[in-house]
Amino acid sequence: MSDATQGLVAFRAEIATWISDNCPAPLLGRPMDESAIVWGGRKWTFADDNQRLWLERAVSRGLTAPRWPTEYGGAGLSRAQEKIYREEMARIGAPPPLESFGLWMLGPALLEFGNAEQKARHLLPITRGQIRWCQGYSEPGAGSDLANVQTRAADMGDHWLVNGQKIWTSYADRADWIFALVRTDRDAPKHKGISFLLMDMDTPGITTRPIRLISGKSPFCETFFDNVKVPKENLVGELNRGWDIAKYLLTHEREMIGGGASGLLGGRSIGQILAAQEGDVLADPVLRAEAMQAEVDALAFTLTMGRYKDQAEAGRGVGNASAMLKYYGTELNKRRYELLMATAGSEGLEWEGAHGGLAPEWLRTKANSIEGGTTEVMLDIIAKRVLEMPNS
Amino acid sequence: MKDLTHSLLETEDETMLRDAARGFLADAAPVSALRANRDAGRAYDPTLWAAMAQMGWTGVLIPEDAGGADMGHRAAGILAEEMGRTLAASPYLSTAVIAASVLRQAGPRAAGSLQSIAAGEATYALALDEGPKFAPAATAMRAERQGNAFRLSGVKAFVADGSTAGRVLVLARTAGVAGDAEGLTLFDIDAARAGLDRQALSTIDSRDHARLVFDGVAATGDDIIGDLDAGLAALRPGVQAGQAALAAELTGLAGEAAAITLGYLKERKQFDRTIGSFQALQHRAAHLWSEIEVTLSAIANAGRVLDATPDDATLAVSLAKARATQTAKLAVSEAVQMHGGIGMTDAYDIGFFMKRARVGAEWLGDYGHHAAIIATLRGF
């Protein structure tokens, strides 16, 4: 065994012990539905003390952001160590101590594009779960055509004055801060007049309104900006270069939404979940065949996620191919929830029934292939950028 | 699969091997060579096989002390993938992958056989299937014992490389009844032995497949590979290596069929436009590319797992074969459809890809066979 392999074996033993010593037993093996997620933030209340304890302990070890540098509250783990950490978490059914848009998106953006002051100010509150962020990208007239954003930030000398409207801002009503794409140059071509701006949701002039969805839930909001004064230092990266950050983050988001297909069901495969259900739900030959196909595809997709991450890690960027992860992962996730609903039968048809909140979760997955770039946009990206097929 | 920390990225050595193989096969075994073989009624070109031996490909899985290059299963898969791209016909899978993997487990008695394979002198066929589907345990063929001798009688219905191979690895029943996993014994016999009638089949992929009729073929205890009544165990390393490499071949085939089709979409004009500018076709091409990308991971993984933990490779191998079977089917179906009428002509190459993909889908276990193994291993 090489030194590196030996080091990983030792790390696995150490991290496994740490997880089982520190994750409160009642949290282990719980279904990972929406209510089990800890989002953190100023308005957050824990469902119970176990959640609070698990977060505090994970924070003390940097494990809310395993790959981030330790100075920003991360654990500074290598890619291989992070994989092991996640495998060991999944093995005993330990939930992630914290999930947030700060961890998934803003943090990576600040680490790449933020200045020293912005990193120092914003990253620690993210890893500690103290500040909850939301994302202000889409607008009523800027969906798939995201670069068409019209929310304007006017340069008033000592501050930005923001006016406009965002839509599909996830959990804006519960978030403390928002990172948004705003137009800072109305005369430039549309991709070249956009900037990336951070705003405290408590700033006067910002209001949010939840949107009720087909799932009966309201994870998304409309967010309105009416003469909002924002400090100049809240602009990330270069003026009018916000599209670069947006593209970087969209790549990140695509990988994450795609990755949800292997993570959302608590690390367990669709086949394992169905096999564990009462009664022989797979006796139906059609459902059984579909479950087998989903299992085959999910296993191969998980390997592909790993391969792409290794490739990015090795400095050989993944680039537009990440559109494939988003496309494939979200379509796979929808298939899995169709299977869960079909095997639940009439028991899955109540909003809150024998299978808990399965029906709303199933409806929620229908957004997977719309948010963060639709399936059709992903296929366009693959066709045009990867396969270099001609424009019409 | 348990240890997900191995990387599926290619090493520099692997990339060099791939590039070298691609360059060689483009010259020595393009698709036009398959067409020429077919038109000449020849299963493969012996000079191609000799060249492969020269480059060490016949010894890819053979230890160095037996004259092999011992490059491992990932490397064997890379070679197979590249052979899939040009539909290169040779006894590579039967001999260099399957037989070599069986024989290297067989101890000192097989050292000579391994040397002959590595040198490009010996070719092998694996005689298993008696019905239309891959099912080793269903073997009914008898090996009747008479002292230390055996008499083999029965019919092997579909044997890849069966009419040209110099030797045959044949699974026969020494105990029990068809369907029992126990009681099977693996024999390594000369194909010229009396009582063995080899009937070449004319199959859609224009390669060598044969029906082997055994009528009291004599064998002795020395011909047995592994232990008496434990033939499936002796066979397993070869079957798994073959499944992984065949999956790699199918994935190379799918990739090339997709590449040829993409080239056609960029060039063919209808309605005064390049048809590749139509979004309906762009999305289908993008979907196909996605499926191939996902399958490539399963191929690399199977090679890595066979190299690292060969005793625990069943899930990885079945995943590779299931995915490759399905992906190749999609690729060749889309390829012919998107070519339109010209894709249906014999003069155009794309049909060769479709026909080989169908044979590869059946050989060594179809999609359902491998998906069922995966389901069992995953607890349902």
Image (tube, rainbow, N blue to C red):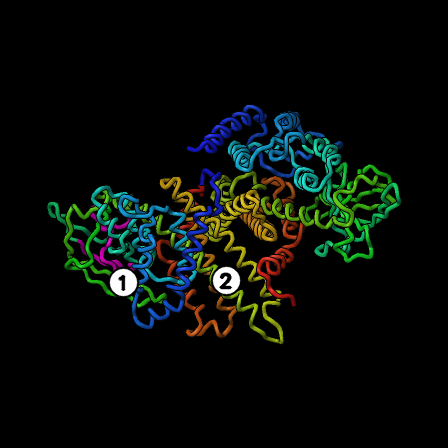
For mark 2, give the secondary structure: helix
Q: At x 47% / y 47%, what residue is drawn?
A: B10
Q: Nearer the viewer, residue A57 or A152?
A: A152
Left or right, A341 with respect to A44, comes to left
Q: Nearer the viewer, residue A384 or B126?
A: A384
Left or right, B376 with respect to B104, comes to right
Q: Nearer the viewer, residue A38 or B311?
A: B311
Q: At x 57% / y 68%, what residue is drawn?
A: B266
Q: Quadrant of residue A309?
A: top right
Question: Would residue A172 be counted in the magenta stretch?
Answer: no
Provide the chain ID for the residue under circle 2. Answer: B
Left or right, B111 with respect to B371, comes to left
Residue A366 is situated, as x and y percent measured from the top left of the image, at 64, 51
Provide the chain ID for the residue under circle 1. Answer: B
State which quarter of the image contains the N terminus of chain B: top left
Q: At x 82% / y 55%, what residue is drawn?
A: A186
Residue B334 is situated, as x and y percent measured from the top left of the image, at 50, 64
Q: Nearer the viewer, residue A54 or B272?
A: B272
Q: Residues within 10 Å of mark 2 (few under 14, many from 20)?
A: many
Residue where numbered disc 1 is placed: B210
Q: Is residue A218 visible?
A: no
State which quarter of the image contains the C terminus of chain B: top left
Residue where numbered disc 2 is placed: B258
Vertical arrangement, residue A225 with respect to residue B168, above or below: above
Residue A28 is situated, as x and y percent measured from the top left of the image, at 56, 30
Give the magenta-colored segment's residue range: B152-181
Name the amino acid type tagged 2.
Ala
Residue B361 is situated, as x and y percent measured from the top left of the image, at 40, 58
Question: Would residue B172 be counted in the magenta stretch?
Answer: yes
For mark 1, give the secondary structure: strand
